[in-house]
Image: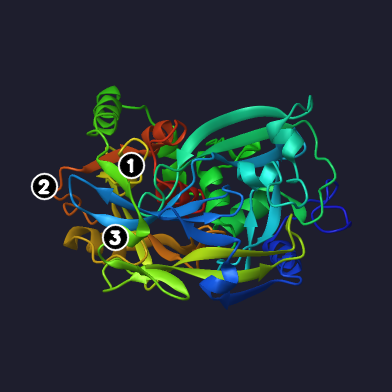
Amino acid sequence: MLTSPLGTAEAPIDDLSGVKGALEAGRRNFSVEAISAEEAAPHWEVIDGALVHASRGFFSATGVRNRATDDERLMLFQPQGAVSGVLSAAPTAHRPRCFVVQSRPEPGNVGETQMGCSIQSTPANYTRAHGGAAAPWFEQFLAFDATAIPIEETTQIDLGAHYFFKSKRAIHVEMPDPVPPKPGFYWLSREAMMDALAQPFTFNTDLRGLAGVCRWSDDPDSGELTPHAPAVRKSLTAPCRSDVLASVFDRLSSAPPSNAEFVPIEGLANWQITEDAICEREPRLGYAMRYFRCGAALREVNHWIQPLLACDAEGRAVIAVRERDGLLEFHLRIADRTGYIRGRALEPGFLASPGEPTAAPDWIERAAANRWGGTRESDEGGRFLTHVTDYQIGRCDAGHDDDPDDPTGVWLRLSELRRFLTQSNFCSIQLRVMASMLLVLR
């Protein structure tokens, strides 16, 4: 690469040390301080049974009850569809695809700063309800720019345990050539992208999720994101089994009607509003909403106040891998959650959100012990405080790769999993994060 400033159009960051340097630069003037509910007002207050922002934008926190199960919990509600997008320069004969990422400080991130998407914004952000600067790259994703061509777009669900019916537009926009990056943003080479995907707490979950659904190829010479492991590439190009696809699609599409209803926070039996939090009376779900004063030099607003959802324990996600007919298959689960837009979605074969018990069935524990890959990541730091999940991929021993008592489990080739990943609202964010890990298995 040419010698020039870090992450420019002429010299994208092409190794992990450059990524770490960009992350360090993003920490400039970063601060997070816990405050009381009184100090958070009038920015955030409980009105009509929900914690809301003064602008009525961004997100709210409210009680949600499932009438069918009597499950009650505090959930985040964000009906304004967010946008997460990645801008890339098309691959050429002389250059693989490269990507624009942001060194993004968030109050809830492990490590304070992680690499984020080219744009990661709610309507309240990009319409400037916060009174700050315009969202960078707005024109490339949300206005007309003749040089910025959308090549992939889906709508993707968010955390079903903590968000109620939240989705976001996941957009991949392509330009013919790199353009000068904006302050706090960097061009990453394909190689640096892959190296960073192998590191914990380096890419935030939105960027990892986009890497999981973006364009892949089994050909390293194509310039696209390509799995390292030959066995993973083989599963990527394997024929899709129409009967398997039809069965999974039918099960995903046949969730019962939603039985959810809003409940005022004050009406939740096990929740209370205190001087510094909205929290459980008795610890059952393992999380609370707390308030913080935040500062960051490279955000649209340099200082702000917001609540964060804080959990008492880490979560865990496990995908077991087996070989059938010479092809890798991945164990997933079709799960119902109150927060999912469709009512159900494909998840990792075992999933416990932060705060939930993390013991998996014995056969999944055996696969997890035969570790093939993994990472620990914090959920999106703009809403969650160091909300960590331990992601694990393990290989099954021959003859020990199924649980006959689990009717929710499915085994998919990577080619089949990609069919669902590239459709809207079928796959949990944890599954999209784990899909990005398949790129870097060795």
Percent position of residue 170, x then y: 56, 38
User: In this orientation, does residue 214 appear?
Assistant: no
Q: Is residue 305 shown left or right of residue 236? A: right
Question: In the image, what residue occupies the spot 27% across and 24% down?
Answer: 246
Q: Earlier in the sequence, mark 2 or mark 3?
A: 3
**Type of residue at label 2?**
Pro
Where is mark 2, residue-wise?
404
Mark nearer the viewer, 2 or 3: 3
Q: Is residue 288 visible?
A: yes
Q: How many marks?
A: 3
Q: Nearer the viewer, residue 429 or 59?
A: 59
Query: Who's the residue at 73% across and 58% down the image?
Result: 301
Q: Is residue 223 left or right of residue 376?
A: right
Residue 122 screen position, x and y as percent: 60, 45
Q: Is residue 80 above or below residue 362?
A: above
The residue to which callout 1 is attached is 346
